[in-house]
Image (tube, helix red, strand yellow):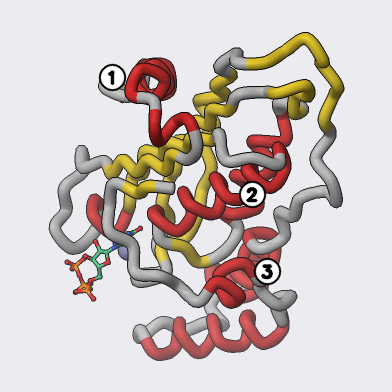
Amino acid sequence: MTNVLCTPAPSESRALTPPQPVDTERVADLISQLLTAIGEDPTREGLSDTPARVAAWWRSFFSSELSATPTCFTEQQLSGQLVVVGGMSVWSLCEHHLLPMNLDVAVGYLPDGEVVGLSKFGRIALQRAARLQVQERFTRQVADEIADVIGGNDVAVAVRGTHLCMSARGVRMETARTTTVQAGGRFECDPVLSQQFLTIATAGWRES
Ligand SMILES: Nc1nc2c(ncn2[C@@H]2O[C@H](COP(=O)(O)OP(=O)(O)OP(=O)(O)O)[C@@H](O)[C@H]2O)c(=O)[nH]1
Ligand SMILES: [Zn+2]
């Protein structure tokens, strides 16, 4: 598989292991300490429920898990058709700043005797987004997971990311968007197929 951005190889076992369940009591306590550290009074009326709310959000953020086996349907006559599922928007958290990144995900694959339930691509994206991430690793993990599901490498994934750490802070470039493309199998070797995928996957990206 090829990635258009250079990705530091993460520890695979670490990257693929879902995070441990969130200790909400401890998180709430730490948020209360954080509020104090930034000069706030965590007991004042507007903030008294904030630590519990934030802790509940951290728990829900990590809770998106994939059901055991994605549903596939036999379609024996089908081979060589390009299937692209796009417009899947998921939220993840940048692991450098703990700020949200919005990831607009499109996946393409070539069914061979079987089709994958369409919603399962969204579930895979949601699951991989539900952790501290970098966009490049997210892109590769989604592609790897789909390759496992279809039992082959003919998979392409394109992701357009909007990183709040680049727009709401730091360089403050609100319109900056990051595109990552992971292409395997025939998507890597066949420039026509690759171009078809990118044209469909990125249609509409320029306006938003
Ligand atoms: N490659 C990659 N970089 C990311 C991603 N999300 C955030 N970053 C970058 O992570 C880098 C962290 O850089 P540092 O210099 O350690 O942190 P910083 O001083 O806060 O950097 P600035 O954002 O430039 O203010 C920044 O360049 C971010 O833009 C991502 O998904 N992929
Ligand atoms: Zn960041």
For disc 1, the neighbor class at 10 Å (few under 14, some 14 to 19, many from 20) is few
Where is 68 relative to 20, above or below?
above
Q: Mark number for residue 145?
A: 2
Q: Is residue 183 above or below residue 135?
A: above
Q: Secondary structure at mark 2?
A: helix
Which residue is most to the front? Answer: 189
Q: Quadrant of ligand 2?
A: bottom left
Q: Callout 2: 10 Å neighbours few (<14), some, many (20+)?
A: some
Q: Amino acid at mark 2?
A: Glu
Task: Please tell me whether mark 3 or mark 2 is closer to you in this view.
Answer: 2
Dot 3 or dot 1: first in sequence order is 3
Q: Please provide percent x and percent y for residue 171.
A: 13, 58
| Residue 126 in view here | yes
In the rendered structure, are the residues bearing label 1 and label 2 in contact, judged by CB atoms less than 8 Å apart? no
Residue hosting label 3? 18
Mark closer to the chain start, 3 or 2: 3
| Disc on res. 207 | 1
Q: Earlier in the sequence, mark 1 or mark 2?
A: 2
The secondary element bearing badge 1 is classed as loop
- Evaluate if marks 3 and 1 touch, with contact meaning CB atoms under 8 Å apart: no
Q: CA distance from mark 3 to mark 2?
A: 14 Å
Q: Is residue 171 left or right of residue 199?
A: left
Disc 3 vs disc 1: which is toward the camera?
3
On the image, the x and y values in percent for residue 80 come to 60, 15
| Left or right: where 150 falls relative to 100 | right
Q: Nearer the viewer, residue 188 or 4?
A: 188
- Residue 146 on image: x %, y %: 64, 42
Q: Residue at x 62, y 47 (%)?
A: 126
Three-letter amino acid code at the position of disc 3: Pro
Query: How far apart are the two marked residues, 3 and 1, measured between alpha carbons?
Result: 34 Å
- Residue type pointed to by label 1: Glu
